[in-house]
Structure formats: structure tokens, C-alpha cells
Amino acid sequence: MGKRVLLIEDEPNIIEAISFILSRDGFTVHTHEDGETAMEKVRATPPDMIILDVMLPGRSGFDILRDLRADPITAGLPVLMLTARGQTKDRDLAERLGADHFMTKPFSNSEVRDHVRAVLEA
Amino acid sequence: MSVASEAKTGSRIRERRIDLGLRQADLAQSVGISASYLNLIEHNRRRIAGRLLGDIARSLDVEAALLMDGADREVLEQMQAAAVHAKSKAEIDRAEDLASRFPGWAELICEQTRRITNLEAKVQELSDRMSHDPALAASLHSVISSVTSIRSTASILTSDEKLDADWQNRFHKNIHDDAVRLAGNSESLIGYLEAPQETLIGNLPAQLVEEWVEGNYELIRSMETSSRAVDDVVGEAELDGAASLLLTQYLDEAMSDAAVMPMSEFAREAKKRDYHPGELAEVFETNLSAVFRRLSVLGPESGHPPMGLTVCDASGAILYQKIAPEFGLSRAGNACPQWPIFEALGQPGRPVEREVVLPTAPKTRFMCYALAEQTISVLNEPPIIKATMLAIPNPSEGAKPPLTVGPTCRICAATDCAARRELSVLTSA
């Protein structure tokens, strides 16, 4: 079984596309659509890496990232943040909260795949 | 006209003559005086006015006033402001010379500066709009999400790797669905952006206050236990007059609420009672609106749900709003009339408790509590009414199905809504 990636994103077609390309690359992809219960999912199925959208129903990706970094168990988990908003303040906030990388939508599949490979196959 | 300005009339005549390439003797002859007299004038040893000044001005193709007074004071100030604004190294002390000798260029500098200032204000207005208009932000997010999905899916379909028929069909359908959604959202955005936005400028002080509050919750909480005066904090906030006044009112009210509902005790009781405003109002013996305000400032970082708050007057104009994820009413005066705050306006003094759901995000529900109260009573005058609504996300399942509420009719996907006042571009597309 390949390295585990947890994709926290609420857009079904984006979930399907990213899951497809990463699965094809040999990664095991779990998905979760709700911000409110995302941390429960992380604890139940600990991933090797998280791809985290900013705008989620329930709780924002920034709040979830804050929780991940505050928990000693998940503090070191690689996190790639995805956002539709490319404003500087969002990028700055993601960096301050401890995101490893930040991509603005629309992104290319190869960008996402290359980053996941770089993190999990290093 | 100042004495100093008048004293330079001769110098201006000389500069203008030289700029036009005229000989002193030729100019003197054209106005019927000797070259030596003109020389005295040009060196400011003879005063000049009246008909002779007019004749010389005509020969030099310039307004007499410009020769007498120099550059218009307003033009000079605008040129100097332009240099300062652009952080330019332009010789500000030579601005009058430039304006006197080349009035056309001076006017062009002023006109360009006015246009730049107006454009910068427009950009700032649009930027503020995107930051503070939840309906617009939601539409833009939907557009970007559709584009992202289409791009990713199309990339898979056009890659070299073979795809089985099931996956091909699935991805083709996804692209089609996203394209339809994108078309609808694009049309709605265009319609929304074309709508007049005068009210946005009028609300700017309130939005500045909301922005300041959003970034200073820690400071506001610390004020509750320290002796920091509201006036000191408002002074340090460096907001303009109208926003300063609103911030003072906000902080005064927040400190009054804190005195009745101290934060640590309030937070404990709120969690214990599942954030029910009615129970909290009884515990702290205070009014519901105060409890709504107090609940809205409980921090999500302490494990409380991120609650939204809206305050409006009797016309529905939003006076204050704390936005929460997926929550926020449009400030453009065209919010969905189904929001419980408007129901409360129709029955002042009677609290409303209603669960709502958004049509485009079926998982996003709120339990809303709203109350309209008369704030000022004057004999024989109409009552002044203010309504407050608290929105708590993801409540436990209620006995009744939730009421569907939207952003604004024009871009709302709800069907069969009795309150709809205009067709939605989403459902009519």
C-alpha cells in the first residue's frame, strides 16, 4: 500500500480528479469534505500528508491547520494548502500557521503530483 | 494677488518672451513701447498693469492674469501634491516657474493626477468589495472552483495515459456539470458587478470598524480585565472620524456587556448550555441582544463554534456584521428577505428562533436567533428600532426542516421560494 494522502476538499469533482491522479501514481488517497469533522478524520486515519482546502463548510482550512500544528501528534505533518484566493495576506497567513506549501486555484495536476512526490518520496 | 507675486510680473514676461524666441525689440515694437522701457519692465524696475499689460499678454499669447499672478494657486497645490503622492524627485520649489511658463503642461499634470487618484480609489473600492461582500466572495469562489475542476479533469482526459470507458464517461460528465455551473456563475457575477454600488461607499466606516474588530479580538478581551480606556484604544486605532465614532460606540457596548457577563464565567455557562441565548439571558439576568453580541465574540480557538452576528436598522441596512464561515448578509440592500432578522423586524419585542440552510451548500445550516428592539422612544415620534441576529453553525438536527435562505435573489439557486423578488440567473440559465 502506498503512502497515505488525506485530501480535505468540498468540491466533488476536484476530489475525483486529484484522487485519480494521485492513486494512479501509487498513493493511497482518503478524502474528507467537511471542515467541522476534519480533525476527527485525521486522528482516525492518520495520513502521511494532507492536502487542505481553505474554504470548507463548518471550519476554514486555516483553523484546521492551526489545530494540526497545535497537536504534538500532527504538528510535523506535511500540509499543502489550496485556495481560490491568491491574495498575499492568505499566503502570509498560511506560512505563519505552518503550511509547508501553498497553491492557488486553478492549479495544474502536475504541480500537485510533483509536490506530493517531492514530499512523500524524499 | 500678493505683492510678492506682482513683483515678478516683469520676470514672467521675460521668461515667456524668451520661450517664444522673441527679441526684446520686437516685443516692444508690437506693443508700442521702447526696448529700453521693456527692459526695465522685464527686470521688475517698472510696474505694469492695465492696457499695456493686456497688449503684452496678447503678443505673448498668454492670459494677463498669469503674467500678473503667476500660476493659479490651486494648480500649484495640485502639482505639489502630485509630486508628493508619487514620491517623485520633481523640483517642487520650481513648480510655479513651470506652471507660469507652461500652463498647458501644468494643467495636464493636474488632470493626470486627478485621474490616477480616482482610479486608485476605484481599485480600493473594488478590493474592499471583494473582501467584505460575502455574496460576491461566494460567487467568485464558485467560479474558481469550477475552473479548477474543469482544468484538472480535462488534463486527465487529454493525457497520454489510456483511460477506460467508465472513467472517460465520468470525467466528461464532470466537465459538463462544471461548465454549466460556471456559465451560470459567470453570468450572475456580471450582473452583480454591473449593479450600482453607491451604498458600499456609504457603509465604508462600518466596514473599517468590522475589519479592526476582526483583527483585535485579543485586545478587546484584554480591555475587559485591564484599565485601558476606550478613548485610548480608539485613538491608537487611527481610524477616520466616522469610523472612530462607530468604534467608540462598539467598544462602549462591548465593555458594558463584559461587565454583566464576565468572559470566563460566560464561556463556561455558554458551553454548558449549548450556547442557548435564552438560558444565558436568564442566568446573567440581561437582555437577549446583549447575549447575542457576547456569544459572537467567543473565540473558535477556545473550542467554541464560529458564530456570526448581524445588526440592522428598521430599513434592513446593516449597521454591524461579524462574518463567519458561509455566513454573511449582503450589504447592498438586497439580502434574502427570509433571514430571521427580517422576520424579527416584523414583530419587535418577540424573539425569533429558526434553523436555516443555504441552497448551494446543503451541509451548511445555522440556528438563528433574532430580536428587534425599540432603542429610542420619543413622544409622538416613530420608534427607532434595531434588530440583532446571531447565527450558530451546525446545530443538532431540529424537529422541523430548516428554512432555506440565500445570498440575494439574483444569484440564489433556491427553487419554489415564495419570497423571491426577481429571477435568479442560476435557475433561468
Image (spheres, coloured by chain):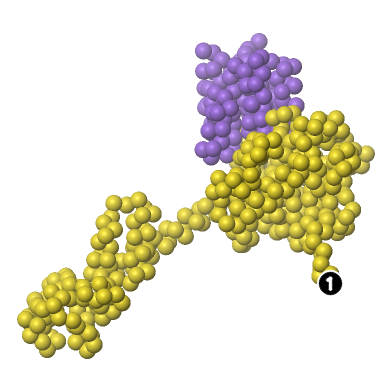
Chain colours: A purple, B yellow
Name the residue nearer the viewer: B293 or B24: B293
The x, y position of residue B125, in whole percent, is 55, 54
The x, y position of residue B140, in whole percent, is 62, 45
Mark 1 Cα-neighbour bin, 10 Å: few <14, some 14–19, many ≥20: few
Name the residue nearer the viewer: B396 or B321: B321
Q: Could you say which quadrant of the image residue B379 lies in?
A: bottom right
Q: Is residue B97 above or below residue B180?
A: below
> Which amino acid is tagged 1?
Asn
**Quadrant of the rendering where the N terminus of chain B is positioned:** bottom left
**Which residue shows up at 81% across the image and 48% down it?**
B289
User: In the image, is B41 to the left or to the right of B306?
Assistant: left
The x, y position of residue B200, in whole percent, is 62, 57
**Which residue shows up at 54% across the image and 37% down it?**
A89
Is any part of residue B74 visible from this angle?
Answer: yes
The x, y position of residue B331, in whole percent, is 68, 54
The chain letter for the residue carrying disc 1 is B
Q: Work out which residue is located at the far right of the displayed protein and give it.
A: B399
Name the residue nearer the viewer: B273 or B193: B273
Is any part of residue B139 visible from this angle?
Answer: no
SS class, disc 1: loop
Q: Could you say which quadrant of the image residue B49 lies in?
A: bottom left
Q: Is residue B62 above or below residue A29?
A: below
Q: Work out which residue is located at the far top of the displayed protein and give it.
A: A1
Q: Which residue is tagged 1?
A: B380
Q: Is residue B278 above or below residue B270?
A: below
Q: Could you say which quadrant of the image residue B114 lies in?
A: bottom left
Name the residue nearer the viewer: A46 or B59: B59
**Which residue shows up at 72% across the image and 25% down it?**
A38
**Which residue shows up at 80% across the image and 41% down it?**
B260
